[in-house]
Each structure stands twice: as structure tokens, then as C-alpha cells.
């Protein structure tokens, strides 16, 4: 088969650019030689046409609404597996055998405690601090506690750091929650599975027994699976870019958390629930639909639209099912927020504006209602997203470090500022 290439002519100069084929998905024009051949850069704000790396981890077909991790559809992973199995798959590339799974679960479980000094670190924050602000600080601070796993050139240290972060993130997230509401921290319990342990650390109190409801912990686990990775999204790209300079993994994940916090990204689950609360009743939906369509109004329907999915987000479908399971288990029959959500979704899916722009509900649309029913305040929603996405960030970071092509990420720019000019002394300005 002849190799395809693309030729770009710019005046007298031209560049012959190889076209690369992935296993599936669109071809990629390798523009590495463009600057040398033509003296020009490409311009692509928001990276809508740019692949930033080669990856074997996650594949998304946004038009078909497909999400695969290492080739496995998200629906199958969420239905048949658990979160730690998904973590193993993302990190190592294959589903674990029973023995590998047992060993992996053991290793993660036995890293769940955080250095005791960390608890004093927490108390430096104001009680009313947003838990995401606390997470940014505390995860970044992990590099001050675990020096023995910050040498990124050592594969063993990289794996120890990876396991530490997957294991400690629920502990830190639960501590951020407990600190926020003024309750004592609850230590991890190693006889509980990952999701059940997290719910226990969040909702148990020292004065009484807390039994984790298995339906709710299964729902929590599924929510973690759905958020585990999503190829080169903004926070993952942030982690890769931070890591490209050789920064330690804890610092890179803290950078990812900072990026995830934004309302256009992970912060959308909090924003979506706030929006449903603001709408309040089904009768007020048309007013908000009109606002979403109004170009002069910055309001957007939170939980709708996606840069990549121009079809139903496959995660949103599973989340919708999980939401009904959780509400059913808790006996919540008449949740006004759910009524607003169902009707909003129905109207938006039949509205010309949303159809034409291919704006479908995304994962955040139903996750807020589900997390609220599980007992979490809205301020914790993005923290839960960060907890689950940590494995994706780590898998992508490891892949980048192991890539022989890896170089520091350093985009160029189209300079539109002043050309060179001479300094004017202050007396003459
Ligand atoms: N409500 C109303 N109009 C919208 C919305 C929305 N939620 N999203 C996009 N549009 C319109 C937008 O105004 C634009 O219209 P026009 O072409 O007339 O200018 C068109 O659709 C394309 O939008 P865009 O902003 O160019 O698309 P994007 O790919 O840059 O943005 C997005 C994607 C997710 C940031 C955006 O859809 C959005 O802000 N959605 C609400 C926030 C949200 O739910 N984010 C969670 C994403 S899923 C979780 C995650 O991966 O983080």
C-alpha cells in the first residue's frame, strides 16, 4: 500500500506532509516538517483539528456516540466490570486475570491511608473553602510527602506514584468533604471495596455504625468507571503538558484538577444541578430554553453539548439508568429536579436549535441528580469527577513518559501585538 501524503504550497515554498493512519478514526496529517518546509505555523485555537499525541488508551467516535477504553466499549465495562478493573485496563492495556485483579486490588487497598501530617495540612484551609480548592492544594502537596516516588525516569517509582494516587484520592476527597462540613476525618477501611470505602469515609461518623448500601456503592463505582478517562480533553492535555517538562506526577495531577474545575469541563456537573435548581419547575423551562438560544445572553444549558460528541454521550445513557436505580433504591419517587431534567431533555432533544447544533445531554446532565441523591453537596461533584479521572490522567501521563517521541510541549503563536519600538522615558510619555 502506498503511503499517503498531503502537500501544502505556500508561495514558492512547499511541504510534503505524511498522512498517518490510526487503528480506527480519522487520518492525521503529520505537520512536524511544516515549519521547516514553509516557515509557517498552523493556527488552531481550541485544538479542534489538532492531534497532540499518539495514544493507545481511549477512542471516541463523537458522531456515532462511541467510547472505547483499550478497545472495550464503556457500556460493557460499566455493566460487567468494576472501577479497579477499569483502572488496571487503562494502566496496563489489558483486562486483568483473576490473580492480577486480586493483586492489583490488594496493592491499591494497601495504599489508601495518607501520611498523618496531611490532616494538619487540611486544617490550614478555611472551612468554607471550595473542596476543589482544597484538592488542588492537597494533591499538589503529596509530592512533599512521597519523595520516594517522584523520579519519573524510574518505571517502578512511576508505578508506585500511580497506585498511590489512585488509592489516596478517595481518602483526600473524603477528607475535603468532612473538613467542609465540620465532621472528623474517617480512616479508610481495607475490608471494603473501593467505592464502598469511599462512601464510608464520606458518610460514617464515629458515634454510630454506618453500613454501606451495596446498590449505592455499585452506583458510585459505575460513576467512577464512566469518568475514568476521555482521551485528550482539557484536563488530560493539561496533565500531559505539565508532565512534558519532567514535573513530578503529583504536581501534574494537581494541574489536571485545577483545569477540571472549570464550568465548561468537570465543573459542569455542579453547574448543571445549580441550573436545574434555578429553573425549579417544569413551567419555567421554555424561558431557559429561550435564553440558551439567545446570542446576546451568555446562558448555556449546562449538561448539554460536547466538543467531541455530536450524538448522545454514551456515558449519559448509563448515567441516566444509574440515576433511576439510585432514586429507586432510596425511594425518591417525586424529585422535582428529576421532573425538570426529564422534561428539559425531552424539549431540547426535539428543539430545532439543539438538533441543528447537535447538542445532546452529556454525562454531567444526570450525574448531578444522582450525586445529590447519594448525599453529596454540589460542591463535591467535581471532586468526585477528579477522583475518578485520576486514573485516566495517570495512564496518559505514563504513556507520554514512555513515548520515545516525547518532548516538552511548546506551542507557537500568531503574534498580533506591537512590532518592535523604542523605549520612551517616563517623563516623555
Ligand atoms: N447551550 C446552548 N448553546 C450551546 C451549548 C449549550 N450548552 N453548547 C454549545 N452551544 C452552541 C454555541 O452557542 C455555539 O453556537 P453558534 O454556532 O451559533 O455560535 C454552538 O453550539 C457550538 O458551541 P461551541 O461552544 O463552539 O462548542 P465547543 O465544542 O467549543 O464547546 C462545550 C463544548 C461542552 C464547552 C459546550 O457545549 C458547553 O459549554 N456546554 C455546557 C457545559 C457542559 O455541559 N460541559 C460539560 C462537558 S462534558 C464533561 C467533560 O468532558 O468535561
Image (cartoon, rainbow, N blue to C red):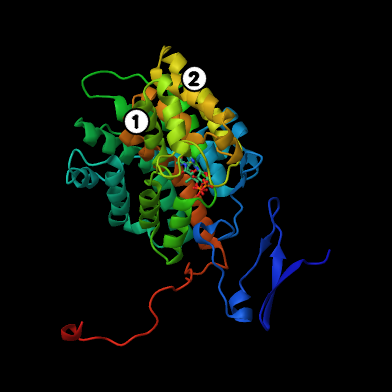
Image position of 143 with respect to 174: above or below: below
Name the image quarter holding the N terminus: bottom right
Local packing at callout 1 (Cα closer than 10 Å; few below 14, some 14-19, many 20+) is some
Foreground of the two, 368 or 1: 368
x, y percentage for residue 195?
42, 30
Image position of 336 with respect to 274: above or below: above
Residue beneath the point at 60% across and 35% down: 355
Which quadrant would residue 127 be assigned to in this image?
Answer: top left
Direction from residue 243 to residue 120 in the image, left or right: left
Which quadrant would residue 351 be assigned to in this image?
Answer: top right
x, y percentage for residue 341?
46, 25
Direction from residue 26 to residue 282 in the image, left or right: left
The residue labelled by disc 2 is: 324
Q: Can residue 301 be seen?
A: no
x, y percentage for residue 137?
28, 50
Q: Residue furthest right?
A: 1
Q: Which mark is residue 420?
A: none
Foreground of the two, 230 or 340: 340
x, y percentage for residue 343?
49, 22
- Give the alpha-carbon distance from disc 1 to disc 2, as whole Å: 29 Å
- Please state which of the two labelled residues, at mark 1 or mark 2, is closer to the viewer: 2
Direction from residue 427 to residue 395 in the image, left or right: right
Which quadrant would residue 9 be assigned to in this image?
Answer: bottom right
Circle 1: element type: loop
The residue labelled by disc 1 is: 189
Amino acid at each position: 500500500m502506498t503511503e499517503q501524503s498531503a502537500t501544502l504550497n505556500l508561495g514558492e515554498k512547499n511541504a510534503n506532509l505524511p498522512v498517518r493512519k490510526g487503528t480506527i478514526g480519522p487520518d492525521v496529517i503529520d505537520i512536524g516538517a511544516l515549519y521547516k518546509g514553509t516557515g509557517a505555523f498552523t493556527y488552531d485555537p481550541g485544538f479542534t483539528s489538532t492531534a497532540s499525541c499518539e495514544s493507545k488508551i481511549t477512542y471516541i467516535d463523537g458522531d456515532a456516540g462511541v467510547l472505547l477504553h483499550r478497545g472495550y466499549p464503556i457500556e460493557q465495562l460499566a455493566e460487567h466490570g468494576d472501577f479497579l478493573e477499569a483502572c488496571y485496563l487503562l494502566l496496563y492495556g489489558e483486562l486483568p486475570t483473576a490473580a492480577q485483579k486480586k493483586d492489583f486490588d490488594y496493592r491499591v487497598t494497601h495504599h489508601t491511608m495518607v501520611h498523618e501530617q496531611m490532616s494538619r495540612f487540611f486544617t490550614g484551609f478555611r472551612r468554607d473553602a471550595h473542596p476543589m480548592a482544597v484538592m488542588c492544594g492537597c494533591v499538589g502537596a503529596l509530592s512533599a510527602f512521597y519523595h520516594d516516588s517522584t523520579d519519573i525516569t524510574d518505571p517502578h517509582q512511576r508505578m508506585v506514584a500511580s497506585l498511590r494516587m489512585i488509592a489516596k484520592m478517595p481518602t483526600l476527597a473524603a477528607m475535603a468533604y468532612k473538613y467542609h462540613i465540620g465532621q472528623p476525618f474517617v480512616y479508610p477501611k481495607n475490608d471494603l471495596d473501593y467505592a464502598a470505602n469511599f462512601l464510608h469515609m464520606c458518610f460514617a461518623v464515629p458515634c454510630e455504625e454506618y453500613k454501606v448500601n451495596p446498590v449505592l456503592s455499585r452506583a458510585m463505582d459505575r460513576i467512577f468507571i464512566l469518568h475514568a478517562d476521555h482521551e485528550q480533553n482539557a484536563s488530560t492535555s493539561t496533565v500531559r503538558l505539565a508532565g512534558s517538562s519532567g514535573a513530578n506526577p503529583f504536581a501534574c495531577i494537581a494541574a489536571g484538577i485545577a483545569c477540571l474545575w472549570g464550568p465548561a469541563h468537570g465543573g459542569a456537573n455542579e453547574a448543571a444541578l445549580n441550573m436545574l435548581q434555578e429553573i425549579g419547575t417544569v413551567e419555567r423551562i421554555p424561558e431557559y430554553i429561550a435564553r440558551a438560544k439567545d446570542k446576546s445572553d451568555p446562558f448555556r444549558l449546562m449538561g448539554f453539548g460536547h466538543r467531541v460528541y455530536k450524538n448522545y454521550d454514551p456515558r449519559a445513557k448509563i448515567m441516566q439508568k444509574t440515576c433511576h436505580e439510585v432514586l429507586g433504591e432510596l425511594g425518591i419517587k417525586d424529585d422535582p429536579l428529576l421532573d425538570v431534567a426529564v422534561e428539559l431533555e425531552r424539549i431540547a432533544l426535539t428543539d430545532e436549535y439543539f438538533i441543528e447544533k447537535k447538542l445532546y445531554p452529556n454525562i454531567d446532565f444526570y450525574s448531578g441528580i444522582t450525586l445529590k441523591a447519594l448525599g453529596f453537596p454540589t460542591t463535591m461533584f467535581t471532586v468526585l469527577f477528579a477522583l475518578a479521572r485520576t486514573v485516566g490522567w495517570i495512564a496518559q501521563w505514563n504513556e507520554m513518559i514512555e513515548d520515545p517521541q516525547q518532548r516538552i510541549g511548546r506551542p507557537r503563536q500568531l503574534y498580533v501585538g506591537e512590532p518592535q519600538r523604542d523605549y520612551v522615558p517616563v517623563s516623555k510619555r
